[in-house]
Image: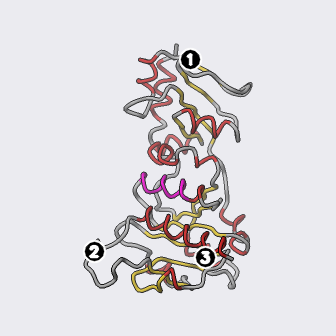
Amino acid sequence: MISKAKVKYIRSLELKKHRNQERVFVVEGIKAVEDLLAIMPAKMLIHTSAWHATRPMPETEIIEVSDDEMRKVSFLQHPQGVMAVFPQQSVKADDWLSLPQSQLILALDGIQDPGNMGTIIRTADWFGIRHIVCSEDTVDVYNPKVVQATMGSIARVGITYTRLDDWLVALDAEVPVYGTLLDGNDIYATPLTENGVIIMGNEGKGISQALRQRISHKLLIPNYPADSETAESLNVAVATAITCSEFRRRMLKR
């Protein structure tokens, strides 16, 4: 059984201000919860009788609830039998200034849709990109809809928020900075490196003017056929997947 106070506390974490005050976030679903439990202890775990822990959790408050109680605390229309409250991870962007010299990093400029954000994190995980730097106006990574859309990949991708312009300026001058733009060069015919920063822009406005000045390699994902009338643009999550795939394909080819 779960107390009314606990129900109120968990439901409050649907709001960013409460998550940030408590420095926690909520994860739901067997795979997502178990993936995160393999990396860090949960502060609280709530489950129905259908779920059983597969590892000891001495630091975790564990509450078994009925199906009705799970529906009261869950953020999902169809609860999946287990949810957990985890501590937020504190990561400073300054700690990542040297990383683009040896690996690829995604930089997200004003991504707003939680589904897009979660899909981008999942895509980064698939292609072995372990770090994402976000502008301060990008949707909160701990938004329940973002967490759900990552399908557990949030456990394997480090994410931080900062002033992207300042962060890019502080990078080593030799670090390549890529961005997808309509006036860019065909990504399939452009040399790509194994390291650097890939900037993906806002769903409606694209990459901001301030950040465009920091791009050293402009890329275009061409439509097909080139002389036909097609959609005005690609969804940013789809564009991210295509871009990451091409970078990794070149690495395999080399």
Query: Please, is residue 191 above or below residue 8 in the view?
Result: below
Q: Position of residue 30 (x, y in %)?
A: 56, 32
The magenta stretch is 114-123
| Circle 3 residue | 168
Query: Please, is residue 83 above or below residue 210 in the view?
Result: above
Q: Nearer the viewer, residue 149 or 94?
A: 149
Query: Measuring 71% from the left and 69% from the top, which residue is drawn there?
Result: 99
Counting every numbered tag in the picture gives 3
Left or right, residue 213 beside residue 172: left
Q: Is residue 237 magenta?
A: no
| Circle 2 residue | 230
Q: Position of residue 254 (x, y in %)?
A: 69, 77
Mark 1 or 3, which is nearer the eye?
A: 1
Precedes in sequence: disc 3 or disc 2? 3
| Circle 1 residue | 64
Mark 3 or 2, which is nearer the eye?
A: 2
Q: Position of residue 197 (x, y in %)?
A: 60, 73
